[in-house]
Image (tube, grey):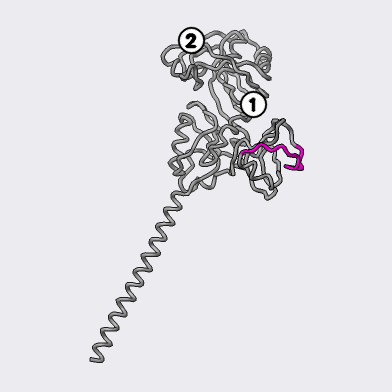
Amino acid sequence: MKNGIETSDMKKGTEILNMKKEMETLIIDNETDISSIKKETLHINGVLNIFKNKGMTSFDVVRKIKFLANEKKVGHTGTLDPEATGVLPVCLGKATKIIDYIMDSRKVYEVKLLLGTKTTTYDLEGEVMETRETDQLTEEEVSEVVLSFIGEYDQIPPMHSALKKNGIRLYDLARQGIEVEREARRINIFNISDLKIDLPYVYMKVACSKGTYIRSLCYDIGEKLNVGGTMAGLNRTETSIFKQEDSINVGDLTKENIQNYIITIEEALSFYPKITINSSFTKLLVNGVKVFDKRITNEKREKNVLYRVYDSEKIFIGIGKQDDEGFKIEKLLI
């Protein structure tokens, strides 16, 4: 009996030990599963400096990044036409709040202009409406006209554009054969450099403001030369701090490496001047209060200039601006 009891107890002990090990294994597996789920649902907040390839729409790029990052909030910072290439910053998560601030910045393009040809879309994707000889043009004449566009001018956007007229996209009207009057918009051509003339082609680098249509610039140059002009190639090399040499080709992004190319919101806004405010005013600013108190900061600040705002604890709060009535956070990013 004694041996029998001992044997029975030993069996029970072994069963309990096995059950305990199974439970530990189950706990470990569950923890691993939970960890995996957390990893998969981790939100990405930041900006990708994407190089867009020819043949892709800007929305194609956004759709691919949504999939790779498993992130719903994704948006680009300025459309590039399908046949154009170049820098296309894409914002993810909380960084979608700063899309407008990146779009407002300076842009640089490498442009190929074809003189003597006019198309419906102001580029080679449209139907040719008219062709003219360019043999009579001299390089000096072309150079003078091209460079005359440096500075501000009122530019009429093309019909084939995403702008709206009475709530309808212009390109939708254009596809129906409808042309409407477009209001000219004041834009700024900061500089035109690297000018190379090989008629009928003209190559140049254009630095410009937000809202500039390079297709319209090509059209306008052609009109001023009285031969017509259309854009034959476009590559965007810069948008704000985002430059082509630092970009990642959208085709090289994977689920495994996408995190490696994320630029923080603070870095993406580094072209704005920085200002540090007294931490005792942080709560008021975060709550949307406009503060008119000289003690808010010891730093000099200009009116109607956007600043990256930090408190004295080095916490990044957002984008703020001073006016006659006080200092206020315009875009809260905390």
Circle 2 crowding by C-alpha within 10 Å: few under 14, some 14–19, many from 20: few
Q: Which residues are magenta?
A: 288-300
Q: Is residue 63 above or below residue 146?
A: below
Instruction: Locate residue 199: give its quadrant.
Output: top right
Marked residue nearer the N-terminal end (1 or 2): 2
Tag 1: amino acid: Ala
Find disc 1 in the rendering and name its residue.
207
Circle 1 crowding by C-alpha within 10 Å: few under 14, some 14–19, many from 20: many
Q: Quadrant of the N terminus?
A: bottom left
Instruction: Locate residue 135: give its quadrant.
Output: top right
Find disc 2 in the rendering and name its residue.
129
Tag 2: amino acid: Met
Magenta stretch: includes residue 147:
no
* SS for callout 1: strand
Q: Is residue 275 above or below residue 40?
A: above
Residue at 62%, 40% in the rendered image: 318
Residue at 41%, 57% in the rendered image: 34
**Which secondary structure dominates the residues rendered in magenta?**
loop
| Number of the label disc, if any, that sits on residue 232 | none
Q: Nearer the viewer, residue 203 or 172?
A: 172
Q: Furthest-bottom residue in view?
A: 2
Residue 40 rendering spot, x and y as whole percentages? 44, 50
Residue 6 rendering spot, x and y as whole percentages? 28, 87
Residue 248 rendering spot, x and y as whole percentages? 54, 40
Residue 327 left/right relative to 134: right
Q: Nearer the viewer, residue 245 or 70?
A: 70
Magenta stretch: includes residue 293:
yes
Residue 268 rendering spot, x and y as whole percentages? 61, 39
